């Protein structure tokens, strides 16, 4: 039997915090228990926010914590062609369309609809679904706008995609979701609406790049924080559309700040580097991160 493959995939748009440390530690433990491999991937697809100094700091902090990785590092920015190929495959099936509404257009459209008493649907993260008006533009008008330099994003036509994928989408959850979901979890991909898969200046969204990378790296076990639990439904849909293998998933608890909210890089929460600077040892930080 071939080895099970795990991965830890931080985005270098901030410093490593306790939540990442917990995720990397759980990944290492589960990989060791399965006699498997743990890969380190740098998810730097967000070219605007990813910075080499964060990547250096993340790698240094992981080394300081004593977390071992197998094989070389994969950086998303080195593999943009892989994401373009996936987008083209979806485009070949007419599953994506150029969406021209700006953030302001979307906000106004939804505000108008809500002002007339309509409750606008939201995705599992609470963001309003894309109105999808320009899904119905014809090819000539799309071309005209693109040639005129109008900004746009490639969005998934979720109705078409869900129909093509069928109703039996599910995944095996070895951890648990925010509402205690575990075992066989069924997916309703329509909850995400017409998500962005790429922008004119960003070759792939997080969702598209992550499923492509996991398949290319033969990842069998995806172990990550519970904040990504519902995204898995969308990942399963993309895997189905692209004919990719289906890994097992294990979502683990999040490390919460004193205010009960999850830690985030953008909130400048206490990072591993700051804990080190405050005199903590790796063992102290590992104890503070806790276990699953
Ligand atoms: N790169 C993502 C992050 O830093 C995680 C990707 C994943 O585990 O699927 O939040």
Image: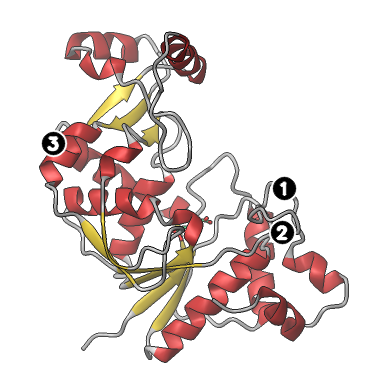
Mark 3 = which residue?
Answer: 93
Q: Label 1 to label 3, Cα distance in Å?
A: 40 Å
Q: Nearer the viewer, mark 1 or mark 2?
A: 2
Count of numbered labels shown in the rendering: 3
Mark 1 = which residue?
Answer: 267
Q: Label 1 to label 2, Cα distance in Å?
A: 10 Å
Q: Quadrant of residue 99?
A: top left
- Disc 1 on helix, strand or loop? loop
- Residue 16 percent across, percent down from the top left: 66, 63
Q: Are marks 2 and 3 in contact (CB under 8 Å)?
A: no
Q: Residue furthest front?
A: 117
- Residue 292 percent across, percent down from the top left: 54, 76
Mark 2 = which residue?
Answer: 257
Q: At 28% across and 62% down in the image, what residue appears? A: 215
When the figure is inspected, residue 175 is found, relative to residue 198, above or below; the finding is below
Mark closer to the chain start, 2 or 3: 3
Mark closer to the chain start, 1 or 3: 3
- Disc 2 on helix, strand or loop? loop
């Amino acid at each position: 039997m071939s080895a099970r493959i795990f991965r830890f995939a931080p985005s270098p748009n901030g410093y490593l915090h306790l939540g990442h440390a917990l995720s990397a530690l759980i990944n290492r433990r589960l990989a060791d228990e399965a006699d498997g491999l743990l890969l380190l991937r740098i998810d730097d697809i967000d070219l605007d926010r990813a910075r080499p100094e964060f990547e250096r700091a993340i790698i240094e902090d992981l080394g300081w914590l004593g977390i071992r990785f197998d094989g070389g590092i994969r950086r998303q920015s080195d593999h943009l062609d892989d994401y373009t190929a996936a987008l083209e495959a979806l485009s070949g099936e007419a599953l994506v369309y150029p969406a021209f509404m700006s953030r302001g257009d979307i906000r106004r459209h939804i505000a108008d609809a809500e002002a007339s008493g309509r409750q606008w649907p939201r995705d599992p993260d609470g963001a309003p679904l894309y109105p999808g008006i320009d899904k119905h533009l014809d090819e000539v008008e799309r071309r005209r706008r693109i040639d005129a330099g109008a900004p746009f994003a490639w969005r998934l036509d979720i109705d078409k995609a869900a129909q093509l994928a069928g109703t039996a989408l599910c995944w095996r959850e070895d951890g648990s979701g925010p509402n205690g979901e575990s075992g066989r979890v069924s997916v309703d991909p329509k909850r995400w609406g017409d998500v962005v898969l790429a922008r004119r200046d960003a070759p792939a969204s997080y969702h598209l790049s992550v499923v492509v990378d996991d398949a290319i790296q033969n990842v069998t076990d995806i172990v990550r924080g519970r904040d990504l639990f519902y995204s898995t439904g969308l990942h399963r849909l993309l895997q189905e559309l692209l004919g990719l293998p289906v890994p097992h998933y294990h979502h683990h608890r999040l490390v919460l700040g004193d205010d009960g909210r999850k830690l985030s890089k953008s909130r400048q929460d206490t990072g591993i580097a700051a804990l080190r600077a405050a005199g903590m040892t790796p063992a102290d930080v590992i104890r503070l991160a806790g276990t699953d």
